[in-house]
Image (cartoon, coloured by chain):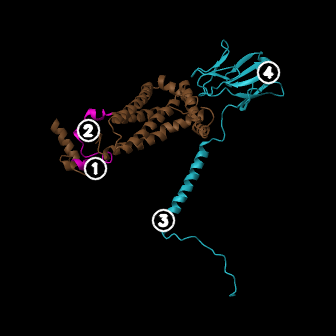
Amino acid sequence: MSDRKPGPDVSYGTPRPELSRRDFLNEITIGALGIAGLGGAALTYQYFSPNVLFEPSTTFRAGIPNLYPVNSVTFLQEQQVYIVRTPAGFYAVSSVCTHLGCITQWKPEANIIACPCHGSKFQPNGKKLEGPAPRPLPHYAINLTADGELQVDKLQIIKVDQVLRV
Amino acid sequence: MATTFHNTLENLRATRVWKSIFRRGRAITNRTRSVAIFGNLFLHWMPVKVREKSLRVQAAYYLGSLSLLLFVILVITGVLLMFYYHPAAPKAYHDMKDLRFVVSNGVFLRNLHRIGAHLMVLLVFWHMFHVFYRGGYKPPHEFNWVVGVLLLLITLFLSYTGYLLPWDQLAFWAVTVGTNIISAMPVIGNKVRFVALGGNIVGENALLRFYVLHVVILPLLAFLLIGVHFWRVQKDGGLTLRSKENDGKN
């Protein structure tokens, strides 16, 4: 047995003589409390984020296309959406101002969408003309249902050049 | 008459009940006066001696004390308003209207609470400017200045959360605009707004959250910090006094 090769040189690191039993227990305790605190913060955040919301549906039907004349802007107050019909087709524009969330108004005499809160102005296609609003009004996805009604999904934002042809 | 009253008081002082509450004699010497302050839970952090100068009106115009007085008025009127208020949509709006037009003296309490809140914001700002121009933030008062800034923020948050509770158009749009400002924060903005409102819109969840913040969490924080603030004024040697020799330093 004397010819047995020596095992690998195992080093457990330099000992830390300065770490007393008291310091060790303190560090363990603070570490454990820190982990528990982080976990508690994460659980609190989860608790405060509701999983079920009793908010109005973000998808709605806007009636048959013939309700909207060509070259018209119709404000659906309950849904806070403009249904715009041009010769090319339909699109749905949000009426919520991109500045601070006020509801804009369609001004047919000036052919603009204007915000009453801080004076932002937009074209009927949502493009920003003026004012503190940082972005144009977004376009929502608009489709035809199987039974021929317009349907808007306010969770889906689409590009400005996408138009629903009917 | 005066002697009868005096005798009654002396007899009362001699009773076992009185002596069980106040374990001292009459506060007639400097020592017994000090003992009277030290032995009282509500006064023990007060100084046993104050300089006459710091009691003058010009020392601080009582701005801090008046802010505290307004806070106490707001707590009392707020608790009374809670007896008629349901933090639920649309009941909250009707309760507010009832308080104004149906409940006896409701309009008095509501306006006392509302105008008191406006005045408190005014007074704490005035107090802050006064302390600033007096140099009251200089050593050894730096920590108390920071506590004061936190109290200013709590006052503003109390105002903002209370603003939603009438559940009228003004409330709705003020909170819509305010929480959209939150969502302008980079990366976490939308998440913070979602948690603050308890949803994507200013609805019932938002009303309840603002109510709990307004009537429990923020007032408790304010109580705690007001305690620290007043205690620290005493520990830092009383009010900052202006004098020509030391340029506002204590």
Q: Which residues are magenta?
A: B33-62
Q: Residue at x 70, y 24 (%)?
A: A93
Magenta stretch holds residue B51: yes
Left or right: where does residue A166 sit relative to residue B64? right
Mark 3 element type: helix
> Which chain identifier belongs to the cyan chain?
A
Amino acid of disc 4:
Gly
Q: Residue at x 52, y 28 (%)?
A: B166
Left or right: where does residue B151 sit relative to residue A70? left
> Which chain letter matches label 3?
A
Mark 1 element type: helix
Q: How many marks?
A: 4
| In the image, residue B100 above or below residue A40 | above
For label 1, count other residues whose C-alpha is less than 10 Å away and answer few (under 14), some (14-19) or many (20+): some
Mark 4 element type: strand
Amino acid of disc 3:
Asp
Residue pointed to by mark 4:
A89
Q: In what quadrant of the picture does the C terminus of chain B appear? A: top left
For label 4, count other residues whose C-alpha is less than 10 Å away and answer few (under 14), some (14-19) or many (20+): some
- Whole-angstrom CA distance, mark 3 to mark 2, is 48 Å
Residue pointed to by mark 1:
B38
Q: Residue at x 54, y 33 (%)?
A: B87
- Whole-angstrom CA distance, mark 1 to mark 3, is 39 Å
Residue pointed to by mark 2:
B54
Residue pointed to by mark 3:
A23
Is disc 4 in the same subunit as disc 2? Answer: no
Of callouts 3 and 4, which one flags the residue occurring earlier in the amino acid sequence? 3
Contact flag, marks 3 and 4 (Cβ < 8 Å) = no
For label 3, count other residues whose C-alpha is less than 10 Å away and answer few (under 14), some (14-19) or many (20+): few
Of callouts 2 and 1, which one flags the residue occurring earlier in the amino acid sequence? 1
Is A51 or B185 nearer to us in this picture? B185
Q: Which color has been applied to chain B in this rendered view?
A: brown
